[in-house]
Amino acid sequence: MNFEPTDDQAMVVETFARFLDEHSSMARVRAALPSGFDADLWRGIAEMGAFALRVPEDAGGLGLSTFDAALIMEEVGRTLASGPIVEAIVAARLLATLGESETLGRLTAGDAIVGLALHDIAAQPSQWIAGGAVAEAVVARRGDEVVLVAVPASARNAEENLAFTPLAEIDFTALDANVIGSGAEATTAFAAGLEEWKLLVAAGLAGLSREALKLASAYASERKQFGQLIGTFQAISHPLADLLAHVDGGRLLVWKAIRDAADGQPEAGAGASLALWWNATHGARAVTQALHTFGGYGLTTEYDIYLYNLRAKAWPLVLGDPQRLLAEAGRRLYAGETATRLDVGAMPIDFELGEAAAAVHAEIDAFFAANVTPEMRETFHYSWEGYHPEVHRKLAEAKLLFPGLPPELSGREISGYASIAAHHAMEDNGYLTPAAGVASMVALMIHKFGSDELKREVLPHIVNGEVICSLGYSEPQSGSDVFGAQTKAISDGNGWRIDGTKMFTSGANLASYVLMLCRTNTEVAKHKGLTMFVVPLKADGVTIQAVHTFQDERTNITFYDNVRIPDSWRLGEVDGGVRTMSAALELEHGGGFDKVQQQLVEAAETLAREIVVDGKPLIDQPDAQSRLARATADMWAARMIGYRAQWGSIERKGAMYFGPMAKLFSSEKFTDDARDLLDLTAPLSLSKRPGAAAFINQCYRHAHGTTIYGGTSEVHRSVIAERALGLPRTRA
């Protein structure tokens, strides 16, 4: 797995970024208004080799990949570089492919501006062309031909437009057109060019949107209202954090589509459509929120944010309504429509976990095939209710229960990627119970911080799969604020007396021990006065009371009344509970709920093929295809954001917000899509009839909890706002 461009790519991007920072500064962008074209910038970009990026080397170009071009387009978007740059890149490749060397040479040298017609001019002879106000020629499809149309100045019908770009409506009816290719080979090349155009515009929008959010965050970190920086207000910071997750997801959807094209995956075509739809839709949301952050000042032309707002909307609209892209993706995924395969060249970004990981996945699949009966599978459940003692114990015997732990605890040496694959395999087999995850956390803490007594009397039973543990963090009055714990542990000289209440102690009715965070000092900052203990749940004074949720699962409220434990059951230093908790982070590789999101979409597709509306299967309706495609995009983006967090954690290259973003984004999208797909497949989805209907029904209820446990969405939004956007602290 890799989420990092090569060193050569990073160097090229840095070179372009420096050039654009100087030559496409906001002063230069403003100076190019109202035409929206900077001739000097155009020649400079050409000299940098931008228009020759995708031209093969044997045609005099640089022979670089679509990914190289996408990375540079992110910088073009970030700096609002003036001119039809993406159209020129695609047109240059088409000219090279079809052998039109004269115009190609002038274009790559910066002496000519060549546009791209996005629709067949035989069917739509008059259409809007990006850069049409300055282009001397346009590459277009005309039926089964590809033509180069000369555009005299008199035909460049420039007019004022939304974003001050050199947009023009051109009537091709009477213009001279030179046929540069005909037949299937030529039209296929042109269709591939349009697919690349989608990806490069999507990449540019990702760069533009991220920069807009950075501008808004910088402003919110300086502007004061009511005596405070407005960035401390969650009403300001949380929407920006949410939208950053969408912008990052859009960038990664572009990368996924390029990777899929490189691998020849059939979903690559839908991926290109979804990438542009996503970045057009959520990019527009991002720049709107960014402008709103400036308040009334955002409406003035004194601040640059309005330029980002207008460009983000205008750039993709030259193709037409972005919702058509969503419909196109729906047809490509669910109606058999094929897309032209794009030759993207080399792609260093890789989402595969590797051969060792695949071997672990296969081993776990074989384990479940050999050891789990259909009757046992019927008891599996995503919650603690799915814990099966026999399966748990046998997994431990096979050294498959705790693949993320050190070898002395797990029984085998395993890479971080193989550990992720093991997690995936458990979920694929329906047995991703929290019991193993919490037990592994407690085992690691005892291994690192436990006394000899705990290591002798408790740890072996955990790693052998004989017992499980629960977590005693949350309390009735503190919720996600674990540092607000008020359950007290008072030293009596020989040990500790624990009194208090813990809420949402899931699994306590099944577990032998609870990992408990207790208040041991009230005279220091609240996060410094906490200590961690292991408490036997069968100890005198422990009461477990069931709390049932509407998600078909049970949690608990647990009461501790004069519970006595020896000091040897303490983990770490007194008042050092926060440091002890940090050990659990070694098991965190990010991730989210993309697996169940995928299963949700598949279940909805199953029902959409069964449900008949107006005499036809629901799946035949364009609206149903679009909604399934939208949920697929959500799932893909969640998966990519989760993979990035896992890669960053394992390679020690990730930012501190990668994991929180993965959990936030995935849980929120799971909730959105569970709600929408429940609607789409109603009224059958109301039923708990075994199969797809019951699963969609369950997903709707399950999804609500995912935004709460493991840290609420509000907490994660604050983390992202602070760590990714540099906003001031939003929590007390």
Image: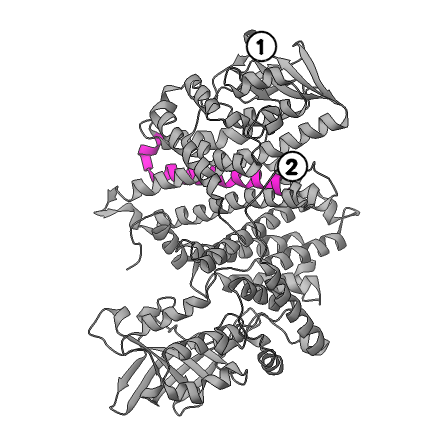
Give the label on residue 68, or none.
none
Residue 439 on image: x %, y %: 49, 77
Amino acid type at circle 1 is: Ala
Please check the rendered image and state whether residue 290 is part of the magenta-colored stretch, yes or no: yes
38 relative position to 486: left or right: right
Residue 687 on image: x %, y %: 68, 64
Q: How many marks?
A: 2
Is residue 42 positioned above or below 650 on the image?
A: above
Q: Which badge, 2 or 1, comes first in the chain's sequence? A: 1
Residue 188, by quadrant, is: top right
Discs 2, 1 touching: Cβ within 8 Å: no
The figure's colour scheme reads one colour
631 relative position to 182: left or right: left
Residue 495, by quadrant, is: bottom left
* The one of 181 and 531 positioned closer to us in this rendering: 181
Task: Assess disc 1: are there few (<14), some (14-19) or many (≥20) residues with their C-alpha within 10 Å of its C-alpha.
Answer: some
Amino acid type at circle 2 is: Asp
461 relative position to 124: left or right: left
* The one of 292 and 368 positioned closer to us in this rendering: 368
Task: Assess disc 2: are there few (<14), some (14-19) or many (≥20) residues with their C-alpha within 10 Å of its C-alpha.
Answer: some
Span highlighted in magenta in the image: 270-299
Identity of the residue drawn at 53% across and 15% down:
112
For the residue labelled by badge 1, is the local secondary structure a helix, a strand or a loop? Answer: helix
Determine the main secondary structure of the stretch shown in magenta: helix
Residue 157 visible? yes
Residue 367 on image: x %, y %: 67, 74
Q: Quadrant of the N terminus?
A: bottom right
Residue denoted by label 1: 155
Identity of the residue drawn at 42% across and 34% down:
78
Give the label on residue 343, or none.
2
Please check the rendered image and state whether residue 431 is part of the magenta-colored stretch, yes or no: no
Q: Quadrant of the C terminus?
A: bottom left
